[in-house]
Image (cartoon, rainbow, N blue to C red):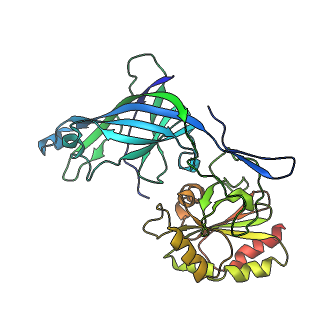
Amino acid sequence: MLKWTVALLWAPLAACNHEDPVETGRDTGEPQVVVLDHGQTLSGDMVWDVDFDEAAEALGFTDCSYGRHYEGFEDRSAPWLCPDCEVPFRADVTMHEGWEACYQQIAEGDPEPSEWLGFGLGTLWRTVYGPYIAREQGAVTEVSGGVTTLNQPDAYPIEGGGTFAFHVTGSFTFGEREGDPMNGWYAADPYQCGWPKADPPAWEGPWRAEVGGTLPDGIFTAQCGDRVRLHDLLDGWLIVDVSAADCGPCQAMAEGEAEFLARVREKVDIHVATLLAPSLSDVLEPASTSMLMDWNNTYGLHEPVLQDRGYGVWVVGSMVGESFGYPTSLIVAPGGEIVDVHVGFGGWEDVEAVVLAGR
């Protein structure tokens, strides 16, 4: 087993070796999904040393440290959350004894019981709670003993005056065990709702999107309960609609979807896949299946309405940048090339013009 010693810098999150599953064709032409049956494990500890400046110490803050113990298993079910990770892990977290006195000086509430950790590009990436994209934490060095450290990070302000800084170190041991690194996230075969199933080769990245590049793949729960793969819809044109249930322009877009499809399908093969968030105030939480079905029934849709798993923000949002908002739509040509992106909704006519111009 490999042992890594990690030297890392930590900053608060902003708000807002194994093969991947392979789908191949048998002689009969039927798809075959190979389910992974083993993956990498992670075990180790990280310690946060907190250094307060003189102004903070005058307010009663005192230098301290706290630690976390991690037990994790490889998780490849949402690789866009850490696009630079070669190996992502979902880890259970146990705080070291006596953590409260230090941790509560710098944070409110209790620490999260699980986190994502990832390794790639010689770096440790870390995120906490749900589908928040991993942030760079610092360099990873494979050594046999000792801890390599980095410079102190920038100081963070304290309400009332003063600052504090983190210095974080840790080490992890890796192994293997039986288990499914995809955590059951495989596309249904066939789809209950009758959607097409192109069965293209497994997608291994990149997990960032750009106009002119290929749409990153993903598997999402749909309103029928199926898990649907985006790349299965690429035999024709595909509109990926990133929406939120309480977004007025998103609702207007959904109201016109069926009419748009009926009109354009007289000329081209086309589908719409809606990635739905539960609300504008909670875009990184998954919508419930009942909410997906309500959206489907309210607007009379016959296309996949999918439970967004952070893909909208971290793939589409990262592509668009500061102008990202709800809805945002990607227009994807047959085969997967992203040919255009629209932020907001001014009418389906704009989308139709792009599709018909590129047919």
Q: Position of residue 108 (x, y in %)?
A: 25, 53
The answer to whether residue 250 is visible is no
* Front residue of this view, candidates 339 and 267: 267
* Front residue of this view, candidates 58 and 327: 327
* Residue in the picture at 38% in, 26% down: 149
Residue 215 vs 9, above or below: the answer is below
On the picture, is 81 further left or further right than 20?
A: left
Q: Quadrant of the C terminus?
A: bottom right
Q: Position of residue 329 (x, y in %)?
A: 64, 67
Q: Position of residue 264 (x, y in %)?
A: 79, 77
On the picture, is 92 further left or further right than 50?
A: right
Residue 352 vs 88, above or below: the answer is below
* Residue in the picture at 81% in, 70% down: 269
* Front residue of this view, candidates 4 and 40: 40
Q: Quadrant of residue 320?
A: bottom right
Residue 43 vs 61, above or below: the answer is above
* Residue in the picture at 40% in, 23% down: 148
The answer to whether residue 307 is visible is yes
Q: How many marks?
A: 0
Q: Position of residue 150 (x, y in %)?
A: 39, 28
* Residue in the picture at 78% in, 81% down: 263
Residue 167 vs 331, above or below: the answer is above
